[in-house]
Amino acid sequence: RESLQLGQLTPILLAALVGTGYALAKGRYNLAGVATIIAMVEPHVGLPVMAAMFVWVPRCRITLLTGAAFLCVVSIATLGFDANLDYLRIVLPAHALAEVPTNAQYSLTWLLYVLGVGERVAIRLAEIQYAITVVAGIILGRLLAVRFQSQTFIPFVAAAFSVIGGPYIHITQISSIATLPVFVIAGRRND
């Protein structure tokens, strides 16, 4: 509740991720795709999860593509194309810049800034690190899914790796999302 009062949508994101994992475990691929789309409420986590699901769970692809198209149409219909473009080009970079000195977040950007790296350079380095970490999470999620015979690793590891470092990340996201793969391992041991 406190997260929502602060404008953090982590509880909704976490529910969507758990829904994705549950649906995968039950073989309900359309539901897994819908839950993954709901995870886009926090795009820096939802997008890596969506990419992992698209690459490794082919039975979710149609639902993911349909859901992504729906979100794009709603966004453009609501705000217009120019406002959406401005959001990507102006608002997001300004938000990242505003978060640099904030000690309430735990990103690579903030760490580099504290160590004396300039704001824009710190953001760029963190963006590169985020991209590398996301790709690693997508690949590792698949490897663990095969190793432990559980597709639930695919979204959970992608989500966990998306909150390591990066341009900006808040503690509520790290603490809740990063623990998801641990629950899968614990669940596999009890089977």
Image: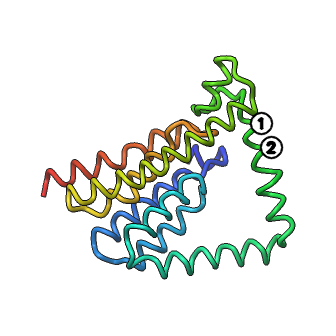
Q: CA distance from mark 1 to mark 2?
A: 6 Å
Q: Residue at x 72, y 35 (%)?
A: 99
Q: Residue at x 49, y 74 (%)?
A: 34
* Residue designated by label 2: 94
To which quarter of the image does residue 42 belong? bottom right
Q: Are marks 1 and 2 in contact (CB under 8 Å)?
A: yes
From the top left corner, tell me how far across and down residue 129 is, in percent: 55, 39
From the top left corner, tell me how far across and down residue 91 is, in percent: 80, 51
Vertical arrangement, residue 171 with respect to residue 182, above or below: above
- Assign a secondary structure to mark 2: helix
* Residue designated by label 1: 98
From the top left corner, tell me how far across and down residue 96 is, in percent: 72, 41
Q: Quadrant of the C terminus?
A: bottom left
Q: Residue at x 69, y 36 (%)?
A: 123
Towards the viewer: 154 or 10 = 154
User: Which amino acid type is marked by label 1?
Assistant: Ala
